[in-house]
Image (spheres, rainbow, N blue to C red):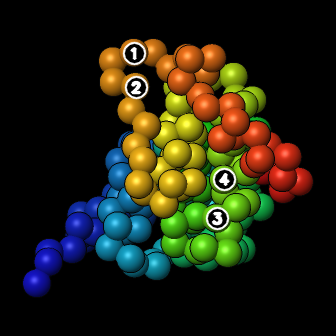
Amino acid sequence: MRRKKFTAEEEATLLDPTAYHVDRASAIDCMRSDNLRLHEALVLSFLDDPSEYLRTSALQTAVHWDAPAYLPLLGQRMRNDPSDVLRGHAAITAWWVGKRFPEHKTTMLSWLAQMVDRDEDLEVRGTAYKQFVDLESDGAERFDIGREDFDPERHVDRARLEPYLRDESTP
């Protein structure tokens, strides 16, 4: 039997309002990894927390718990959150939604394409493109630029992206 990652210690950290925000975010991630749905009100309260780490963990967990209900929020955060950390993780979450819920795959591809096309942070754009390529190819292709810096002009296959940029669904 696999030992649970979400231990009593992680739970105590999550519940302690004086605990370091990164540790609380890590506790949420452990809980999500173990497919647990505990302390829902507390976790959801972090969706608007000043800490980008708590917002990120709360968003990923909310989508994991109930993707259809939280897709509008995911799209909004992909487009508007001030944190490049959160937007990058939101791209990974969109990939997960597209893999897990085939009925949302085209929408997630559109949202990822829009991030690749419009996000101001090159690292976020690279993360979004990596997720886009994997999702669009059903895992048959991997995009990895290795040590090179992501350069949309050199690395992005615009013809592949264009059909999804025309989609009306806006994150």
Quadrant of the image occupied by residue 3: bottom left
Label number found at residue 109: 4
Residue at 42% x, 57% y is: 139
Left/right of residue 25 with respect to residue 45 in the rendered view: left
| Secondary-structure class at tag 1 | loop
Q: Amino acid at mark 3?
A: Lys
Residue at image mark 1: 148
Work out how far the residue at label 4 is from the one at label 1, CA to CA, in angstroms: 24 Å
| Secondary-structure class at tag 4 | helix
Work out how far the residue at label 4 is from the one at label 2, CA to CA, in angstroms: 20 Å
Residue at image mark 2: 145
Residue at 45% x, 15% y is: 149
Q: Are marks 2 and 1 in contact (CB under 8 Å)?
A: yes
Marker count (numbered): 4
Looking at marks 1 and 3 on the same chain, the residue that comes earlier in the sequence is marked by 3
Q: Are marks 1 and 3 in contact (CB under 8 Å)?
A: no
Work out how far the residue at label 1 is from the one at label 3, CA to CA, in angstroms: 29 Å
